[in-house]
Amino acid sequence: MSQSLAQILVHLVFSTKDRHPLIHDDIRGELHAYLSGILRAHESPALMINTEPDHAHILFSLSKKRALADVVEEVKKGSSKWIKSRGPAYTGFYWQGGYGAFAVSESHREEVIRYIAHQREHHRQTTFMEELRTLFTLNGIVYDERYLWD
């Protein structure tokens, strides 16, 4: 095969530093657009982005030319810098050091898009911490609780 073809869907989840509720509704729409732009610039188009006050969920198609860790670093670094420029309420903004990334099969794309789109309703019943533990368990990821919540 002379072509290199790939379809790698990634559900990315990360929180604000110490899960501080710093993503206010007044910047959410702009933040989503900015995150989408960063991903597009790295040839990894966003399929769905949603944020809650203390965390973000992004479904994107990872470029066959980019490493996941590099794309995530650019997303977090670029968006953190942008958020800090939004005014005095955001000057102390930071994302957490780590992230969760989960492979998504094409057959589950729409289900994950719906899941991400309905985060507000989801978090009326489940905390972010419970949600992340469930995602790790469902995806067979072994984790150390001591290092999850920076």
Image (cartoon, rainbow, N blue to C red):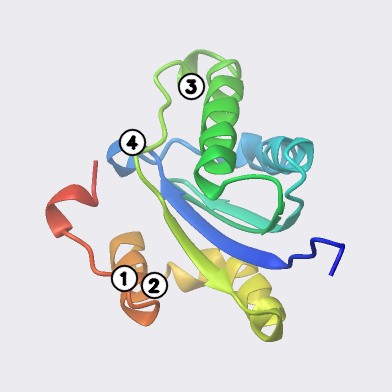
Question: What residue does disc 4 label?
Answer: 17
| Mark 3: amino acid | Tyr
Mark 3 or mark 4: whose residue is earlier in sequence: 4
Q: Residues within 10 Å of mark 1 (few under 14, many from 20)?
A: few
For label 2, the crowd category at 10 Å Cα-Cα, with few meaning under 14, some 14 to 19 and many 20 or more, is some
User: Residue, x 69% and y 77% (percent of image)?
Assistant: 109
The answer to whether the residues at label 3 and label 4 have Cβ atoms under 8 Å apart is: no
Toward which corner of the image does residue 112 lie, by quadrant? bottom right
The residue labelled by disc 2 is 135
Decide: few, some or many residues near mark 4? Use Cα within 10 Å; few <14, some 14-19, many ≥20.
some
Foreground: disc 3 or disc 4 = 4
Depicted 8 relative to depicted 146: above or below: below
Q: Kindly state the secondary structure of the residue where label 1 is placed.
A: loop
| Mark 3 lies on residue | 90
Image mark for residue 141 = 1
The foreground one among 92 and 37 is 37
Q: Secondary structure at mark 2?
A: helix
- Labelled pair 2, 1 in contact (Cβ < 8 Å): yes
- Element class at badge 3: helix
Q: Amino acid at mark 4?
A: Lys
First-in-chain label (3 vs 1): 3
What residue is drawn where x is 52% and y is 56%?
12
Task: Residue at 43% x, 49% y: name it.
Answer: 14
Q: In the image, 61: left or right of 2?
A: left
Q: Nearer the viewer, mark 1 or mark 4?
A: 1
Q: Earlier in the sequence, mark 2 or mark 1?
A: 2
Tag in front: 4 or 2: 2
What amino acid type is highlighted by mark number 1?
Answer: Ile
